[in-house]
Image: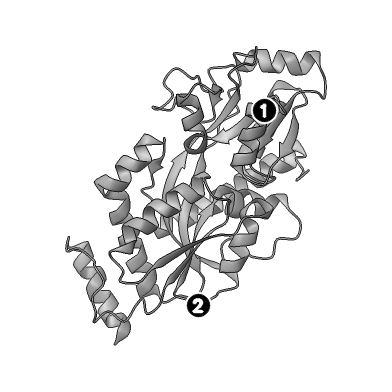
């Protein structure tokens, strides 16, 4: 039977035997659609393409990465939600599509828990507040002072409404008691271009996406959103260190499939993703751009999503945060 073979493969992988698809394996039988619900060159896209390439030689079928951005990641997530039971569709789920968007927007076309099989946490990293390297602003305090001196004139960009970067900016504005005008973009690339071009005052961006501009000294990082400093930006303080202890948030991305896939296949994916994240190749790639590989399997990752929905629902309600 097809899934008896899959169980044998999963058992072999758990025992340390490479889980490489063979001609006798009944799955996959056609190319796998890997939905990335954000534009090219963003953190989700970077992680997806690294993993898809790693799997390309292991599963015996091509993995086709499709960028389906829009509505803070919800457009792509809806494609996967509507593919119930399809064993050849997967996605990178995220804080935006499965933790923030479902409680920020009124009309969300899917249930972030019931409509998906959540398989494994893929990676985590901070948001980074940055300015153009030519900006006179050199600290979070100076940016907040500028916002107080020029009410409504200080802007910050993000890759879109409902993203973690959008919400971190709102947490900072709320903690500082100032107005930071949010400018949403269709992805990270145009937001960074406008920061470099001087069209916006600051940018809240994911570390893996922005790190190249920090290395080239084109952008200046002011603070990171996690409780501890990022190893790739050791000289950049946290928001806590900058005087805003409540501005703490972690970007998270995971691997998910539609609801209704066979549990044996979900377990196989969990084993495969765990092996990928433990490989020297993927760990090295992630480390260079500031991503910590995820360690949460299916049950723990699903629990994380549930807890994040509750957390952001309260933050959004208490701060009267809107989707702009």
What label sits on residue 85 in the rendered view? 2
The C terminus, quarter of image: top right
User: What residue appears at the point 54 percent right and 23 percent down from the top-left corner?
Assistant: 218
SS state under label 1: helix
User: What residue appears at the point 29 percent right and 76 percent down from the top-left corner?
Assistant: 6
Q: Residue 118 at x, y = what percent?
A: 47, 61
Q: Is residue 281 above or below residue 250?
A: below
In the image, 231: left or right of 320? left
Q: Is residue 242 above or below residue 284?
A: above
Q: Nearer the viewer, residue 303 or 155?
A: 155
SS state under label 2: loop
Q: CA distance from mark 1 to mark 2?
A: 46 Å
In the image, 3: left or right of 243? left
- The residue that label 1 is drawn on is 197
User: What residue appears at the point 46 percent right and 53 percent down from the top-left corner?
Assistant: 254
Residue 171 visible, this orientation: no
Q: Residues within 10 Å of mark 1 (few under 14, many from 20)?
A: few
Q: Residue 36 at x, y = what percent?
A: 53, 57
Residue 18 visible, this orientation: yes
């Amino acid at each position: 039977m097809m899934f008896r073979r899959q169980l044998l493969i999963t058992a072999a992988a758990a025992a340390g035997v490479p889980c490489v698809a063979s001609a006798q394996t009944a799955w996959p039988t056609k190319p796998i659609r890997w939905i990335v619900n954000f534009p090219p060159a963003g953190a989700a896209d970077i992680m997806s393409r690294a993993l898809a390439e790693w799997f390309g030689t292991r599963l015996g079928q091509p993995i086709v990465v499709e960028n389906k951005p829009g509505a803070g990641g919800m457009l792509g997530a809806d494609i996967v939600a509507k593919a119930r039971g399809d064993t050849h569709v997967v996605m990178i789920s995220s804080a935006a599509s499965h933790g923030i968007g479902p409680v920020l927007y009124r009309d969300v076309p899917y249930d972030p828990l019931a409509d998906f099989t959540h398989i494994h946490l893929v990676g985590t990293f901070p948001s980074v507040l940055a300015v153009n390297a030519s900006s006179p602003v050199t600290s979070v305090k100076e940016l907040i002072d500028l916002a107080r001196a020029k009410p409504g004139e200080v802007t910050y960009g993000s890759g879109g409404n409902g993203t973690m970067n959008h919400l971190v900016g709102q947490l900072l504005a709320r903690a500082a008691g100032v107005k930071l005008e949010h400018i949403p973009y269709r992805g990270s690339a145009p937001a960074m271009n406008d920061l470099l071009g001087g069209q916006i005052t600051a940018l809240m961006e994911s570390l893996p996406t922005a790190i190249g501009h920090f290395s080239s000294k084109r952008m200046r990082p002011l603070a990171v959103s996690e409780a501890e400093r990022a190893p790739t930006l050791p000289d950049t303080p946290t928001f806590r260190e900058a005087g805003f202890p409540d501005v703490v948030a972690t970007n998270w991305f995971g691997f998910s499939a539609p609801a209704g896939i066979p549990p044996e296949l979900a377990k196989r994916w969990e084993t495969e993703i765990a092996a990928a994240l433990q490989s020297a190749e993927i760990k090295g790639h992630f480390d260079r751009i500031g991503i910590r590989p995820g360690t949460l399997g299916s049950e723990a990752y699903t629990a994380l999503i549930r807890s994040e929905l509750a957390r952001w629902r309260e933050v959004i309600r208490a701060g009267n945060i809107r989707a702009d």
